Amino acid sequence: MAAKTSPNPRLNLRFGDHADIETVSNFIDQHWQIGHVLSRDRELLDYMFLEKDGRLNFALAFEPLSNELIAILGYLPTNVSHSRISLSMWKARPDAHLRKYKAGLAVLRFLIDELKPKSIFSTGISADTRDVYKFLGYSCDVMNHHVIVNNQIDEFKIIKNPPSSSFYSQTYGSAASSLAVIKSDEELRNAVSRLGFLETLKDIDYLCHRYLNHPRFKYEVREVMLNAKTVGILFFRRLFANDRSCIRIIDVVGAEICLKSAIQPLIQEMLTNGDEYIDLLSWGLDGGQLNEAGFANCGEFTDCVVPEYFSPFSQTTVERWLFTNLPDTEIIYKGDGDQDRPN
């Protein structure tokens, strides 16, 4: 795919390609964070942002006289048409002589004007950018964090002060539900083809690439069955700290019906494996249905600490903020965007 450029005479704006990878990597190291994982792990950078046709999913701004890279904005599409994208790695150089270009806003406007995405969002946005997104007309909110705790454990080493209402003490979901392990692209494609709905907002190539072909993380993928019918796909990871483990749900295809059907067999897996808890970071799901499935909202328990960081491990609570242009219809999980990646 040819790199598209902007006619803006004051700033050279274009999408990246394969030849820009080293330049972007160096920019991240010099102007975002020294030693950032995407500046030192070339395979991970390629995996996340480089398309098969050589397109690098970054909008880039170059100073017209020196041709130096002065701003970047990455994006992660969840379908081949790039109609649903998550923004990532938005940074402009703060040098005084470059401020006249307003390069940060320029790359954002260029990306939106060129891609014209139906859905645009980003998770893990900083306090500094919330006002910018609000000014541009987007909705900003904090993501919800829910948990179900293993009631067979007396002393917890990962979670701190777990809410008693989230302890698994009764049968949630349906006895007619089950989880089938998915290990290959073919198995995932077959499971998606059996779903009773057409629009998932994430195409099958994205799901295979994101969860089965990740170069650093091992994701568990399950086909969720209810009365022998496929009702969704569940993606999760096991996280480890202090000689204990937990289950973190990363993505869901099938929304509340998938979670409600999956929770009983997933809890059984938690009990069998000795995991401390199951947690879910999301936005846009029906809170009442999550409560019915057995989840407790961590935000309602001020003393509860469900750690966010495991590499390195830190027993602290972290609020995850997002912006979205579709507040009434969007459902967003931790796996959407770049928040579930190595540090």
Image (cartoon, grey):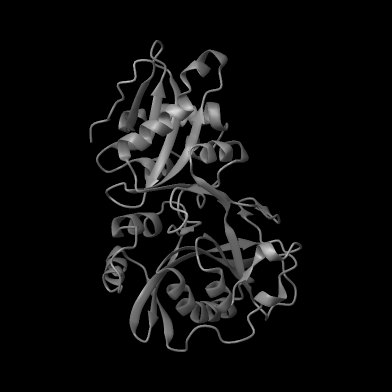
Relative placement, left or right, of 55 versus 30 is: left
Image point (47%, 54%), residue name: 327
Residue 189, horizontal then vertical, whole percent: 28, 66
Q: Quadrant of the C terminus?
A: top right
222 up-or-down from 108: above or below = below
Residue 207 occupies quadrant: bottom left
- Residue at screen point 59% across, 51% down: 320
Residue 57 shows in the view? no
Residue toward you, 199 or 186: 199
- Counting from the top left corner in percent of width and height, residue 64 is at 38, 14
Residue 335 position in % (x across, y down):
47, 56
Residue at position x 41%, y 30% in the image:
107
Taking 220 as reference, is 317 above or below it?
Answer: above
User: Which residue is painted at 34% across and 85% down in the image?
Assistant: 228
Q: Looking at the rendering, in which quadrant would you find the N terminus?
A: top left
Residue 259 percent location from the top left of the image: 47, 73
Q: Which of 295 and 22 is in front in this view?
A: 295
Front residue of 265/42: it is 265
Question: In this image, 103 relative to 114: left or right?
Answer: right
- Please say whether residue 179 is visible from this viewpoint: yes
Count of numbered tags: 0
Q: Is residue 265 above or below residue 145?
A: below
